[in-house]
Image: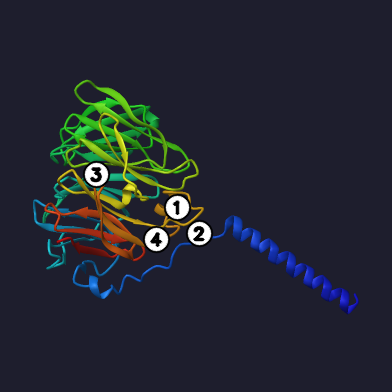
Amino acid sequence: MPRKTLILTIVIILVSAGAAGLLWYLVFGPLTAPAQPTGTTLPTELQGKIKQLSPTPTLWASISSSQNKIFWYDESGQLWSSGLDGSGAKATTQAPVQNFIKSAWSKDGSKNVMTLGTSQKDIRFVSLFSESAISTFLPNNTKTAAFSPDGKRIIYQVIDDSKNQNTLFGSDPDGKKAATVAVLRLRDVVVGWPQASLISFVSKPSGLVGGSLWILNLKTLVFDKLIDNLNGLEVLWSPDGTKMLFSNTDQNAQNPRLSVMDLNGNAKDLGVSTAVGKCAWASNNRDVYCAAGHWPENAVLPDDYYKNAFSIVDDIGKINVDSGKKDIIISSVVDAVNLVVSQNQDFLIFITKNTGRLYRLGLK
């Protein structure tokens, strides 16, 4: 082959490969997001306001008002505790749990139902916080669980297709005195217990499908659908169970919006683009604290965010859901999840999504 022909052939191959590579990147390439803070250095004006509690990545955290402690699980499944001011952090004597995924806490933060992942299925069990904690496994094929408002009972859904079973059970927190509450048709839902006589079921969130919220009245055993066919739907009940935060996306799984709704279906857009998973109610049932940042273009929300496909830089602020008033507490510092507000609103805790560290943020 002549030398000029050979060179021309190579150039054509390289140009074609480059064009193909560009096309692949545009179609399949990674999502982009703003540059992330390292989590190791805070702005000077925040160093007295934010305290790092966990030296290692944290999986889940809560505030126990009944025990005046902050509890958290580290990446090894070890339970830690500290004082409310963040002092005296130490590992508890509770044996580490394996394959920890997430946790649902009682309202006072004194006990929780954990989800543990295995190679075959998820198993949930109850852990009672004490130095000699007793853990009780719930039945196999338990899919979702929640505490009653007073923390004295739990509900959990068991789906066993081999037995044609889809049942909602109620029991003591240790799994004893179990009884059937209702036979269900709903699947792939997250259960909640906002009021003593009300059970809620919300579709697992995905921006690719419409989600719904159902309410079960325990006195009449009648189901009502409160929200229907909202993409990316997530719900967070107020402490008294009279209203809820909910977030949803548009039909393209983008532009998440935060709203508040009462039990009569009266809803109000709060004018914030964030997901419920980045918010927490205060005990006064009026104030919510949320982390919100700029979402990357072309992301499927909230799916990609919860799959850790990207991270964002958040402001953390306070919203009065009655008046709509918003106050920024800190700006452009962290990507915050797992927010929990103390009983007196003097501090909140959160986990940084990009580092997994647990922080305490003073509010007063």
Q: Reading the chain from its start, which is encountered first: label 3 or label 4? A: 4
Instruction: Determine which of the numbered discs, if any, sits on residue 321 in the image.
Output: 3
Q: Is residue 118 left or right of residue 209?
A: left
Q: Are marks 2 and 1 in contact (CB under 8 Å)?
A: yes
Label 3, label 1: how far apart the Cα atoms are: 28 Å
Residue occupying the point 25% across, 49% down: 325
Label 4, label 2: how far apart the Cα atoms are: 11 Å
Residue occupying the point 49% across, 55% down: 297
Q: Which residue is label 1 attached to? A: 304
Badge 4, how many Cα within 10 Å: few under 14, some, many 20+? many
Instruction: Determine which of the numbered discs, if any, sits on residue 31 in the image.
Output: 2
Check disc 3 and give the amino acid type. Val
Label 2, label 1: how far apart the Cα atoms are: 9 Å
Q: Which residue is label 4 attached to? A: 312
Q: Nearer the viewer, mark 3 or mark 1?
A: 3
Q: Are marks 3 and 2 in contact (CB under 8 Å)?
A: no
Query: Residue 156 is drawn in which quadrant?
Result: top left
Check disc 2 and give the amino acid type. Leu
